[in-house]
Image (tube, grey):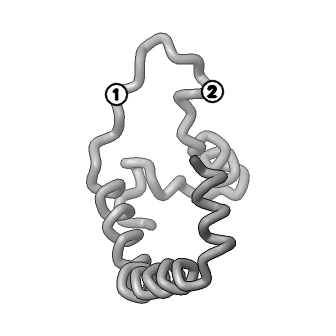
Amino acid sequence: MLRLALRRLTEDAGLRARLGSAARHYWEAEGTIALMARDYEGVLEAARIAADPALPARWPAHLRADGTAAARRLAADMGVAFPLDAASPGTL
């Protein structure tokens, strides 16, 4: 089936032109940088306000790590409070 569709495309210049034109019109309407940025902002906002996932209790530590342990060690090495800890509110 794919072979037949590709053969038809190779042999039908009008079909190629129509498909190409339709694809360009779709992209110009739906694929702009502004629309993409809006969609990414929506996804990031949804992630920001989402509750932390409930992880299974028996998951190994490397799957539960959130990356802050290394950041806490670096902050401690520099003698500063880690800004995400409750002990240092508003210091982001």
Name the residue located 37 percent from the left edge and 48 percent from the top edge.
Answer: 86
How crowded pointer 1 is (Cα within 10 Å; few <14, some 14-19, many 20+) is rated as few
Q: Is residue 19 above or below residue 60?
A: below
Viewer-closest of 52 and 36: 36
Q: Is residue 68 above or below residue 12?
A: above
Q: CA distance from mark 1 to mark 2?
A: 15 Å
Q: Percent x, y for residue 85?
A: 43, 48
Displayed quadrant of residue 66:
top right
Residue 65 falls left or right of residue 36: right
User: Of 60 and 85, which appears nearest the observer?
Assistant: 60
- Element assignment for label 1: loop
Q: Nearer the viewer, residue 3 or 40?
A: 3
Amino acid at pointer 1: Ala
- Other residues around mark 2 within 10 Å, as few (<14) / some (14–19) / many (≥20): few
The residue at 45%/53% (across/down) is: 84
Res 33 seen here: no
Res. 9 in view? yes
Task: Give the quarter of the image for residue 22.
Answer: bottom left
Amino acid type for the residue under numbered disc 2: His
For residue 70, which quarter of the picture?
top right
Q: Which residue is mark 1?
A: 54
Tell me which residue sits at (45%, 67%) in the image: 92
Is the residue under label 2 in contact with that under label 1 (CB below 8 Å)? no
On screen, residue 70 versus residue 33, left or right, reads right
Disc 2 on helix, strand or loop?
helix
User: Residue 15, image x and y in percent?
Assistant: 52, 78
Q: Which mark is residue 62?
A: 2
Q: Residue at x 36, y 59 (%)?
A: 89
Going from N to C along the chain, the mark reached first, 1 or 2, is 1
